[in-house]
Amino acid sequence: MTVLALLSLPFLLVGWVVKGITYAAGWLMNLYQRLQARKRVAIEAELDRTQAELRGTILSLADALGMEAHEARKALIRESYRASGRVPEA
């Protein structure tokens, strides 16, 4: 009976080693996935920040273009009145 117990000891040791390796591999995989998720969140936050910044830039440029267009229309109307010699009605 003692011989049988001694013969089964290597199998038990191999089983514990395999179990330890699978546990460590699972832990490492979870760590890797957490790091990837953290990196993904950081990239998405940077993209959101850049998108908001670009949106603000686009809106300010559109506002500036609108103001320039308004001034150009006023100047064109003013020049057309000067060319015709008429006085604009108040």
Image: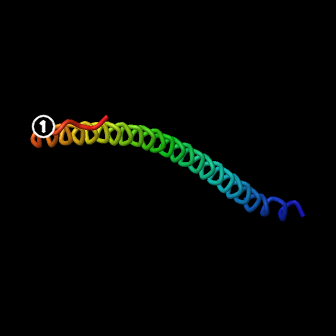
Q: Residue at x 36, y 36 (%)?
A: 60
Task: Give the position of the N terminus as an image quadrant.
Answer: bottom right
Left or right of 27 on screen, residue 54? left
Left or right of 47 on screen, residue 76? left
Task: Give the position of the C terminus as an image quadrant.
Answer: top left
Return the residue nearer the eye: 23 or 42: 42
- Colour style of the rendered protein structure: rainbow
Where is residue 30? Give x, y as percent.
63, 50
Q: Residue at x 79, y 63 (%)?
A: 8
Left or right of 22 on screen, residue 39? left
Q: Residue at x 69, y 52 (%)?
A: 23
Secondary element at tag 1: helix
Q: Residues within 10 Å of mark 1 (few under 14, many from 20)?
A: few
Where is residue 42? Give x, y as percent.
51, 41
Vertical placement of residue 45 versus 24, above or below: above
Left or right of 9 on screen, residue 36? left
Total numbered labels placed on residues in the image: 1
Return the residue nearer the eye: 13 or 34: 34
Instruction: In the displayed orientation, state which residue is furthest to the right.
Output: 1
Q: Where is residue 41, by image quadrant?
A: top right
Where is residue 70? Give x, y as percent.
28, 40
Where is residue 68? Give x, y as percent.
25, 38
Q: Residue at x 28, y 37 (%)?
A: 89
Residue under label 1:
82
Amino acid carrying label 1: it is Arg
